[in-house]
Amino acid sequence: MNLYTTEIHPQNKETILFIHDYSMAGWMWDEQLKAFNDYHCLVPDLPEHGESSDVKPFTIENAAEMIIELIKSKAHNEKVHLVGMSLGAQIILQILSEAPGVVDHALISGGLVNTTPPTETFLKLLDDLIKAYLPIKNDNLSIGSYIRSYGIPRGLVRKFKQSTYTIPTDSSNRIIRENLLFEQPTGLEKVNAPVLVLAGEKDYRIIKESAKDLLNTIPNSEGAMPMKVGHMWNMENPELFNSVLRAWIADKPLPENLKLKTI
């Protein structure tokens, strides 16, 4: 079964493919689609998310393979500018590892990577955290905390709630483990495509540490920290995000007035 995919402006020469985060869907890129109407844009819903909820099971490797096939079937010249946040960033790293030739430029933000295997203590803590979270994942209080933390605009709150409700408990359990146990894939040290590695100033410390690890691994990479924003800053400050993305994929300097600093 194919991923549900929003496709706009197929007549434009260059393709951008946007990959969303866990518990969301393609709607999280609404402001980017408005701003990039001069590009051919592809926005898939990941397996077990949104309109792809019947595509099972979700794994990062499986999602990466399905997106590689999507690129080969729909992208111009079978090559795309890849853009991903959090879980989407991890999938991009997997794609760079498996099929770097389909990537023109990549922008990843909020990507967690582990460079060493997890300890037994960490795995036990993860089990406990997931057991505590899953029974309350659809509660208004729990959802509200994510809305505030991610800076989700009021107009997208309903879509976020619906996306959260769509993912059943057993799927959430698996997806969360895929996310938190994701290890830096092999082969990134051979990637030639330009990769921009980002972490918001208000993002988690472990995300910033992961960004530094990636910058030390990927040869043709640059890092930057957008100021005064957090984990999902493409929704929190779409103007800033869109300016950074447009400059990056056009091989132009990142605008100095965007209040960026090096990670």
Image (cartoon, rainbow, N blue to C red):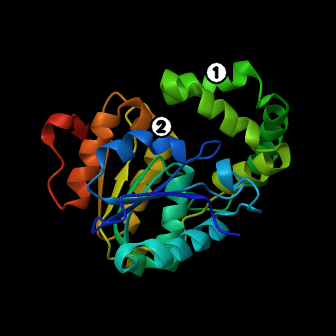
Q: Is residue 262 visible?
A: no
Q: Nearer the viewer, residue 144 or 200?
A: 144
What amino acid does circle 2 point to? His
Badge 2: few (under 14), some or many (20 or more) residues near its Cα, within 10 Å?
Answer: many
Q: Secondary structure at mark 2?
A: loop
Residue 217: give x, y in percent of width and height: 40, 67
Is 123 above or below relative to 259?
Answer: below
Tell me if mark 1 has few (under 14), some (14-19) or many (20+) residues whose alpha carbon lies within 10 angstroms of its own. Answer: some
Measuring from the top left, give residue 105's x and y in whole percent. Answer: 32, 66
x, y (%) of residue 263? Answer: 32, 46
The amino acid marked with disc number 1 is Gly
Q: Can residue 209 be seen? A: yes
The percent position of residue 196, horizontal first and vertical second, equals: 32, 57
Identify the mark nearer the N-term, 2 or 1: 1
Query: Which numbered marker is on residue 34?
Result: none
| Residue 227 relative to residue 217: left or right | left
| Gap between marks 2 and 1 measured at Cα | 15 Å
Comparing labels 2 and 1, the label whose residue is closer to the camera: 1
**Residue occupying the point 52% across, 78% down:** 98
Q: Residue furthest top?
A: 141
Q: Which residue is mark 2?
A: 231
Please state which of residues 99 and 69 is positioned toward the viewer in this rendering.
69
Question: Dots 2 and 1: beta carbons under 8 Å?
Answer: no
Total marks in image: 2
Q: Which mark is residue 144?
A: 1
